[in-house]
Amino acid sequence: MKKNLFRRILSITAAACVTMSIAVSGLAVNAEEEVNYAPNPGFEEGSDTEAGSWGLWPGWDQGSFITKAAEELHGGSRAIKVVLNEEQNYALYAGRDGAAMNVSGAMTLTMWVKYTGITGEGFKIGLERKTKETNADAHVWGETITGSSDGWTQLKLDIPAAEEAIANINIKVEIGKGAGTLLIDDVVLNGEAPLPPEADPTKNYARNPGFEEGSDIEAGNWGLWPGWDQGSFITTAAEEVHGGSRAIKVQLGDTTNYALYEGGINGSEFDLKSAATLTMWVKYTDVTGGFKFGLERKVGDTANDNYFSDMITGSSDGWTQLKLDIPASQMDLTEWIIKVEIDKGAGTLLIDDVELKVGGQSGEEEEIPEDKKPGVSITDAKGQNILTNNGFENNDADWGVVNGASITTSDSHSGAKSVKVVLDGNAPGMWSNLKGEISVDLSKAMKLSFWVKMENVTGDGLTVGVERTCMDADFNVTNANVFSEALNGTSDWKKVTVDIPATEGCYSLVVKANFPEGGTGTAYFDDFHLTTADEKDMNLLNNGGLDKTNNDTEASGWALSPEWPKGKFNHEDVHNGTSSLELALGTDAYTLFQSSGWGVLSYDLKQSMTFSAWVKASSVTGEGVSLKVERKNGDDLVGEAVVSTAVTGTSNGWVQLKVVAPAVTDEVSEIIVSVNAASGSGTVLVDDLQLRTAVASDTENGGEGDDGEGGGSVPTGVAFPALAVLASVTSAAALVIIRKRK
């Protein structure tokens, strides 16, 4: 099947307008606590004859321009006074440069003036700007003013962002020849904070890149998880060093994973949104489990925009330089962390001579013959956002936004813009328009996340997800659509994640929002992220949180025996999300179940899988509640059904049941998972059901479940296998191997 390809295209359009308003006397400046970038704004600093930080043409010595008379002041104890004449024009000015503020950005200039009997050429306020590259004028001026004001009046000038980079600016008042008196006081220049320093494309921003600094047991500026004291990682053997006298050596093992990292790279050195190139020299032998390298790009405590290589295994042909081109970010980043993540396994890995370049390339690329390249997958960019303009900063570019949906600046999760949707029966629409070449196999498992804020959303609720069109081996076209749970009510900004299982033969994809008919309220959407994902991190069940209900009568994607609506939905006591299913035990046994054969979503049914659910039992008698997994080929059972230990009695809060279904070799057409509540008494709540590809730690004993918050003590007789938790969530990107040292 021919794959659709995608190349990320970023286009920025700018529109600007210049306005000037004159506020009547008595109006206050509404600066909304913005920084005033005007130096010495009230002219309070300076000598008796001049104002500090300000210049006056043709010179302060050409008259008496500082006034302290109370009736001539707007604020403070000093102001500027200019008496116009027919022989001389004047210019009052103060400069700012890029170290003080973003001189290329949008600004607002205000000042208080009081003028009487102004004739002739009058006066005007403005901002003089010179472009950095062409040295051309990019000045912005207000209108020329004559006559008399009604007391103190505030002038305001809105200055748009410059189309070209600006070298520096001058706040300026030009006063022409004529007559009359002009008083000036309390200048305010609001604008953007200074831009980060420009990156030096020749500089290596990795500190201690060759690990030469440090003690005998650790490398200065670098950290190692779980700790430098967990082994011998510094090597000085000549055959194990690429350059200098030291390198990092990691002997992989089957009990511990490692992470080598260097943090503290912040915006004081360059713009953290910049693209970068990360290279390092490695030498590895018989590596299993694998390793990957990249950047953790921190947004805050809860969000990242990480970019990592694919996992690397096998053996290199001597020292090999790995290179990772990291695209620019659209997020407001706070820190970069260079990182090498090394998984459990076997083999030896040597690392040396790390290089981080910003805005430039590292070394000359040299093509390596295919038979000299290690076994590296370069087909996918895991973690890379497939969606463009995901924060709507470029308005509706690459998106469809219609009817009651529109781009707004009234609220946002990040940046300046979001999509606002008003539900009033007007059938709003919002969907992605993927353009260009998509370098992602749309059949793969994916994760979609977005941020939403709701105000009194009523009706059946909003849903957001993906629509995929797929073709099977017989050329039958099917749909593989997956959507979030229904979203309604009122909430502050919250993140919603949708797991999208792999489905064979998909060739088109649209991210789409569905809005209920007859619903009311307002919703905001921002910061969409769509990426491929490892299937072991995916929940393969449809509506595993039981949050998608049909008017609280049944859970979408699930069947209940004897029938719906036995059981009821509880919206007060949930493990996660908006609802749980409450089963009141009696003479009838309950079975809540889902079959892979009900939908078009597909995955390897033969592989080992883990089925889990969170339950909360209250006074349960009889044989209790348990989980079951069974596989079938047609009507025939494949292997044996696997059943968990049952929960009885009263649990201490929410507890997680888990059962591992081992891999099988026979053909499987269907897998069925079920929660079985035997006859008895008491009640049990069920929530957050998950079916995942099993990992090794699923078969280990001890510990609590990992698939959600909460949880209490485990009822007697119920085993809770431990599940390994990966400390950092990273992404993967295409890997390029360049110069090999002979």
Image (cartoon, rainbow, N blue to C red):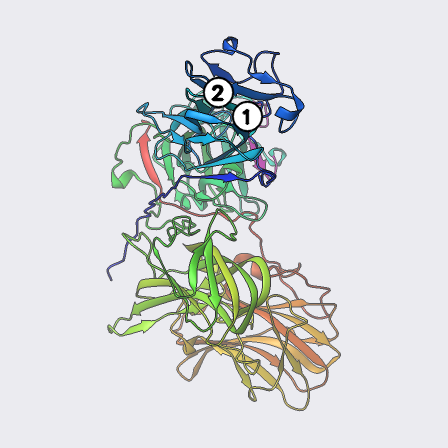
Question: Is 331 or 38 nearer to us in this picture?
Answer: 38
Badge count = 2
Question: Is 360 or 413 nearer to us in this picture?
Answer: 413
Which region shows up in magenta?
A: 214-227
Callout in the foreground (1, 2): 1
Q: Which residue is mark 1?
A: 184
Question: Is 421 or 728 nearer to us in this picture?
Answer: 421
Q: Is residue 472 above or below residue 388?
A: below
Q: Residues within 10 Å of mark 2 (few under 14, many from 20)?
A: many
Q: Is residue 682 above or below residue 512?
A: below
Q: CA distance from mark 1 to mark 2?
A: 10 Å
Looking at the picture, how far across and down is residue 184, in whole percent?
55, 25
Residue type indicated by callout 2: Leu
Q: Residue at x 47, y 55 (%)?
A: 526
Q: Is residue 710 visible?
A: yes
Decide which of tag 1 and tag 2 comes sooner along the chain. 2
Quarter location, residue 275:
top left
Predominant secondary structure, magenta span: loop
Looking at the picture, how far across and down is residue 453, in whole percent?
54, 59
Please identify the quadrant where the N terminus is shown. bottom left
Relative to 1, is 236 on the left or the right?
right
Q: Which residue is mark 2?
A: 92
> Mark 1–mark 2 contact, CB under 8 Å?
yes
Residue type indicated by callout 1: Ile
